[in-house]
Image (spheres, rainbow, N blue to C red):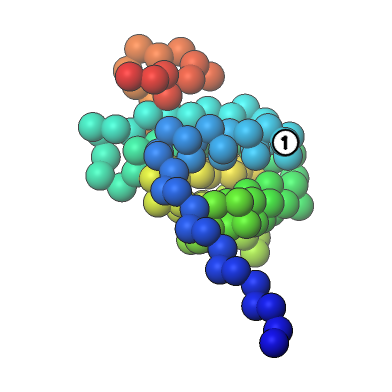
Amino acid sequence: MTDSPEPAAPQPELTSEALLERILASLDDDKAEDVIPIDLRGRSDMADYMVICSGRSSRQVGAIAEKLVDRLKSEHGRSCKVEGKDTGDWVLIDTGDVIVHVFRPEVREFYQLEKMWQVPGARPGQAAAAKA
């Protein structure tokens, strides 16, 4: 008789806040720069949060995105949709509850997404994901 491995216990579903914290930790681990979380609750149906950050080069942008996707898959069983990884200028990672944009600095400056989504009156760089 052979011993079969026991099925993995199902991972508890992450809240959007816990997912955001895990994403921010991953971005910090990989030295993402100018990380700005934006609270979308009540402002958009697409996600609860958006995170915008930069990598210094196309190579770092791709690595930050790849490691984030790998961590979420291995640690939480969460599959993500990824766009733009091949070019490394702007990678969009859709985790479901949190949308992550990883930019090269020049591309981020051109699109200025944080200005479009920032809460009116918030200072640039001010975390808009304050717990409600």
Q: Kindly identify the residue that appears in the image at 60 percent across and 51 percent down.
A: 75
Q: Identify which residue, 116 or 10, lies in the foreground.
A: 10
- Residue 120 position, x and y percent, is 32, 18
Q: Amino acid at mark 1?
A: Asp
Q: Position of residue 130 (x, y in %)?
A: 41, 19
In the rendered image, which quarter is residue 66 located in? bottom right
Vertical relation: 16 (above or below) 74: above
The residue at which mark 1 appears reads as 29
- Residue 82 visible within the image: no
In x, y percent, where is residue 103?
60, 43
Dot 1 falls on a residue whose secondary structure is helix
Q: Nearer the viewer, residue 106 or 65?
A: 65
The residue shown at (56%, 38%) is: 22
Q: From this viewpoint, which residue is outermost toward the bottom?
A: 1
State left or right for residue 12 relative to residue 88.
left
Q: Residue at horizontal 48%, vertical 58%?
A: 10
Image mark count: 1
Residue 26, image x and y in percent?
Answer: 65, 39
User: Which quadrant is the C terminus positioned in?
Assistant: top left
Q: Quadrant of residue 57?
A: top right
Q: Residue furthest front?
A: 1
For the residue pair 3 and 43, the one nearer the viewer reads as 3
Crowd band around label 1 with a 10 angstrom C-alpha radius: few (<14), some (14–19), many (20+): few
The reply, left or right, for residue 37 in relation to residue 8 is left
Image position of 84 with respect to 129: above or below = below
Horizontal side of residue 34 vs 49, given as left or right: right
Say whether residue 93 is left or right of residue 15: right
Residue at the image position 40 percent from the left and 39 percent from the top: 15
Q: Is residue 117 above or below residue 104?
A: above
- Residue 130 shows in this picture: yes
